Image (tube, rainbow, N blue to C red):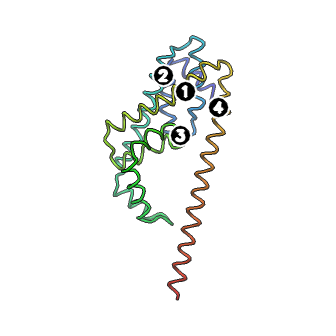
């Protein structure tokens, strides 16, 4: 991974870092926690301009987010409901609650979601499904991405050859977020199965 990123930045410079971040949005297994500090370190060595790194990585974030936004927009509400209706344990009310939440807190969700591992990519799809106004989505995505990117690029820039420490510490946070997501899914499944059993038991009576 590191060798590939280094080669990309050596070949393309700051636009290469932006391309890597755009791909990270589309393929979350590519971690921004590695790409951004490495870009910062490379800039500290004088091989890339720091301001250009911040501009291109933020541009890459926005391009990747817009691609996923249009995936959600093309999918649309009706297709989303149709797909959800075929999934086990999912109710129409679940989708309606999600929609209601997004209508109330969509702006904050998009902005802060750009700074949360895993959700950084996923949040763009429901924004597209709900057709959040594109200028607002772009503005919030740019602002949130700029903050996130600046923190990690500057960390790599200041840490120098110790840039990899960023990944070590942030990786713990990513695992915590992933663990909470898994726990929430497990609780959801358990509760929904319990509701089904109660419903069948009541029906038999």
Compared across the picture, whether 37 is left or right of 135 comes to: right
Distance in Å between CA atoms under marks 1 and 3: 13 Å
Distance in Å between CA atoms under marks 4 and 3: 14 Å
How many residues crowd around disc 1 within 10 Å: few (fewer than 14), some, or many (20 or more)?
some
Compared across the picture, whether 151 is left or right of 70 comes to: right
* Pair 4/3: label in front: 3
Asked if the residue under mark 3 is in contact with the one under mark 2, i.e. CB atoms within 8 Å, the reply is no
Q: Secondary structure at mark 3?
A: loop
How many residues crowd around disc 2 within 10 Å: few (fewer than 14), some, or many (20 or more)?
many
Disc assigned to residue 10 = none
Q: Quadrant of the N terminus?
A: top right
Q: Secondary structure at mark 1?
A: helix
Indicate which disc, 2 or 3, sits on the residue closer to the N terminus.
2
The residue that label 2 is drawn on is: 54
Residue at the (59%, 25%) spot, across then down: 37
Query: Looking at the image, which is closer to me, 139 or 59?
Result: 139
Distance in Å between CA atoms under marks 2 and 3: 19 Å
Residue at the (56%, 67%) spot, across then down: 191
Asked if the residue under mark 3 is in contact with the one under mark 4, i.e. CB atoms within 8 Å, the reply is no
The residue that label 1 is drawn on is: 151
The residue that label 3 is drawn on is: 116
User: In terms of image quadrants, where is residue 154?
Assistant: top right
Disc assigned to residue 167 = 4
Q: Secondary structure at mark 2?
A: helix
């Amino acid at each position: 991974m590191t060798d590939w990123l280094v080669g990309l930045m050596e070949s393309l410079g700051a636009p290469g870092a932006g391309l890597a971040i755009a791909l990270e949005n589309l393929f979350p297994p590519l971690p921004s926690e590695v790409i951004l500090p490495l870009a910062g370190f490379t800039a500290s060595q004088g091989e890339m301009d720091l301001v250009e790194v911040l501009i291109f990585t933020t541009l890459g974030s926005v391009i990747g987010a817009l691609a996923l936004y249009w995936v959600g927009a093309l999918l649309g509400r009706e297709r989303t409901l149709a797909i959800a209706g075929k999934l086990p344990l999912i109710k129409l009310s679940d989708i309606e609650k999600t929609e209601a939440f997004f209508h109330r807190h969509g702006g904050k969700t998009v902005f802060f979601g750009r700074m949360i591992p895993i959700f950084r990519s996923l949040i763009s799809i429901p924004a597209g499904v709900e057709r959040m106004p594109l200028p607002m989505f772009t503005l919030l995505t740019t602002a949130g991405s700029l903050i996130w990117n600046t923190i990690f690029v500057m960390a790599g820039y200041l840490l120098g050859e110790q840039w990899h420490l960023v990944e070590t510490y942030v990786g713990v946070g990513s695992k915590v977020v992933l663990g909470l997501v898994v726990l929430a899914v497990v609780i959801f499944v358990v509760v929904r199965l319990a509701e089904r059993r109660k419903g069948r038991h009541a029906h038999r009576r």
